[in-house]
Amino acid sequence: MASKSSIEWTQATWNPVTGCSKVSPGCKHCYAERLARRLKAMGNPRYSRGFQVTLHHDLVDLPLKWRDPRQIFVNSMADLFHEKVPLDFIESVFVTMQLAHWHTFQILTKRAERLAELAPSLPWPTNVWMGVSVERQDYTRRIDHLRNVPAAVRFLSCEPLLGPLQLDLTGINWVIVGGESGPGARPMNLEWASGIREQCQAAGVPYFLKQLGGVIDKRGHDKALLEGRLWRELPSQTALNSTAAGAAV
């Protein structure tokens, strides 16, 4: 339920929740759903319910046992803000992140409305980064909800990118872009990726191109080149300190 990660923008995953349900077009070929079914077939007890939302109370304090600082993607196999995850459980996850101050936690949700609703009830230590998925223009409304969350770092995951995006990057500290991978992958037009990059450059926001997508192994750096360059920008420490100071005022 926790391991080193091959996801390019993080170092480890922590899954106190597993399972989810589809809410938008980006969910169509969900990698987590495919993996959950495979793990269930293999007899993994954590996935005895397949991809149904399941709370793993015994894993809530796991990051406190990891002494070496790392970037941790929270719930790579679920959505922490799914409607079936109770507020008190979400609060317990945030308490762990607050206590494990030597780690950086990265949370990603498609349920931006619930995120905005619950955000005032949660602690927001500076080591928690909060992001929303924006796969298509008609889902950019999620960004407006994210802007109201007092996270030290607010980021967008435009993956799988399913069309061109015009973004208002006010209050956003980082943008990740990626094409869809795996069976049935829908193609990403490189002009969509370069268009977002240009918007990020104009706004001074770091741009991270994770992958171009496709059904073959795409993790080699040559597979993620855009106009001859590998884009792996991260929020700078100066920007993080500035954002944290603003959040504390």
Image (cartoon, grey):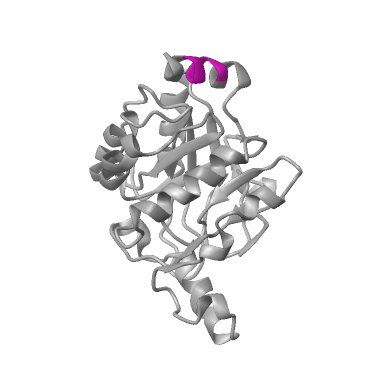
Residue located 59% across and 80% down the image: 44
Tell whether 125 sits left or right of 82.
right
Per the image, is 243 magenta?
yes
Q: Can residue 124 be seen in this view?
A: yes
Q: Where is residue 22 in the image (x, y as percent from the top left)?
A: 32, 64
Dividing the picture into quarters, in which one does residue 68 lie? top right
Residue located 43% across and 73% down the image: 51
Q: Where is residue 178 in the image (x, y as percent from the top left)?
A: 49, 47
Tell whether 239 sits left or right of 55.
right
Q: Where is residue 243 in the image (x, y as percent from the top left)?
A: 48, 19
Per the image, is 240 magenta?
no
User: Is the C terminus in the top left, top right, bottom left or bottom right quadrant?
Assistant: top left
In the rendered image of this protein, does residue 159 appear above or below residue 154?
Answer: below
Q: Total number of numbered labels?
A: 0
Q: Position of residue 188 (x, y in %)?
A: 43, 50
Q: Give the range drawn in magenta.
A: 241-245
Dividing the picture into quarters, in which one does residue 137 lie? top left
Dividing the picture into quarters, in which one does residue 191 lie? top left
Query: Which residue, as the protein is rendered here, is positioned at the far right?
Result: 68
Residue located 48% across and 27% down the image: 152
Residue located 45% across and 33% down the image: 124
Q: Is residue 215 visible?
A: no
User: Is the N terminus in the top left, top right, bottom left or bottom right quadrant?
Assistant: bottom right
Closest to the observer, 61 or 207:
61
Q: Main secondary structure of the magenta part?
A: helix
Tell whether 139 sits left or right of 55.
left
In the rendered image of this protein, does residue 82 appear above or below residue 173?
Answer: below
